[in-house]
Image (spheres, rainbow, N blue to C red):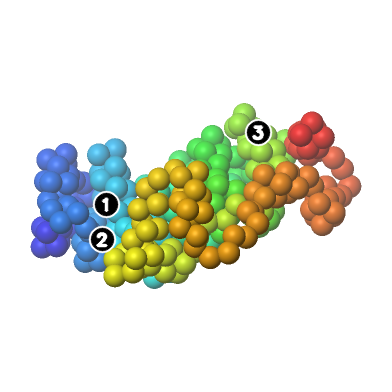
Amino acid sequence: MTMQFRSLAKTAAADGEIDAAEILSLRRNAWPDGRISPDEAEAIFIVNDRIAAPTTEWSDFFTEALVEFIVNTAEPRGYVSEDNARWLIERVQHDGKVNSLTELELVVHVLEKALSAPDSLRQFALDLVERAVLTGEGPTRAGGQLEPGSITSAECALIRRTIFAAGGDRPAAVSQREAEMLFRVKDATLGAANAPEWERLFVQGVGNYLQGWQGAKGLTRERAGELEAFMDDRSSNLGVFFKRMAMTNANGFKQAVRDVGLGRRTPSRDVAGEAARDHGVTDSEKLWLDARIDADDQLDPLEEALMRFLSEA
């Protein structure tokens, strides 16, 4: 397959396009073993670099194939390694810029698909969108036709998908750094002809950081690997037991543990209580919010909307 990709890369370099029949051929030959190799992933990027105007068919194949490589190549599957995240970032900006929305879409889709990913990848995607809003240049800016200092519907969608993606240091939750990014974008776009969904995104994003459950963190890639190895250890009766119990529901699992008497019982974690306590705005979070609202000595419309949301909640 690698030789076929190299041949296609040369063809694409000559005419700057790839047709539907070639894409179908690649798709049929891409996963005979269910995996994408590093050489194949690199070849796919080479083809993408040569295409002047990616079609929907190519963008779909490009994203699907590379998500499979980045998310599921290294064990444990679903946990993006530091090496794969670094490779993706370097490959996307190999010439100092992100050339297409297809590449940015790939980064965001990796974050959505992964169970966990290095925070550098999530930050990379958000930096690209923020830079486009502030400078008017980048893959979301329709070839430079849009003025800087406003935020589009496409950019709102990308930010929303990224900050609430599964992969990251706080899966499906907004971190302080991301909330600060929302404030910077808000300050840079005040009074502009912004997308109508921007106010809602700002309020929900910052509100999620202030009222979100701080305990909602996923397994690290290293810890997931340890647990997977433990579950796969069929020589251990305990491993077999837990693997069988993992296929039951939560109540069945708890009952089974009690039935076999595995160790001393410890008080269960009060997840509901933790979530309820974190829902309130803490003193440190209030100081953080006050500092941003007081920065320009005025309460703008989006900050007013945020304050109403917090008071109603």
Closer-to-camera residue (190/3): 3
> What residue sits right under mark 2 in the picture?
41
Q: Are marks 2 and 1 in contact (CB under 8 Å)?
A: yes
Picture disc at residue 24: none
Spatial separation of the CA atoms under disc 3 and disc 1: 33 Å
Q: How many marks?
A: 3
Q: Is 293 left or right of 175, judged from the image as shown? A: right
Q: Is 5 left or right of 154, judged from the image as shown? A: left
Q: Are marks 3 and 1 in contact (CB under 8 Å)?
A: no
**The quadrant where residue 46 appears:** bottom left
Q: Earlier in the sequence, mark 2 or mark 1?
A: 2
> What residue sits right under mark 3 in the picture?
200
> What residue sits right under mark 1 in the picture?
65
> x, y (%) of residue 290?
85, 50
Q: Secondary structure at mark 2?
A: helix
Residue drawn at x 61%, y 31% as measured from the top left = 197
Q: Earlier in the sequence, mark 3 or mark 2?
A: 2
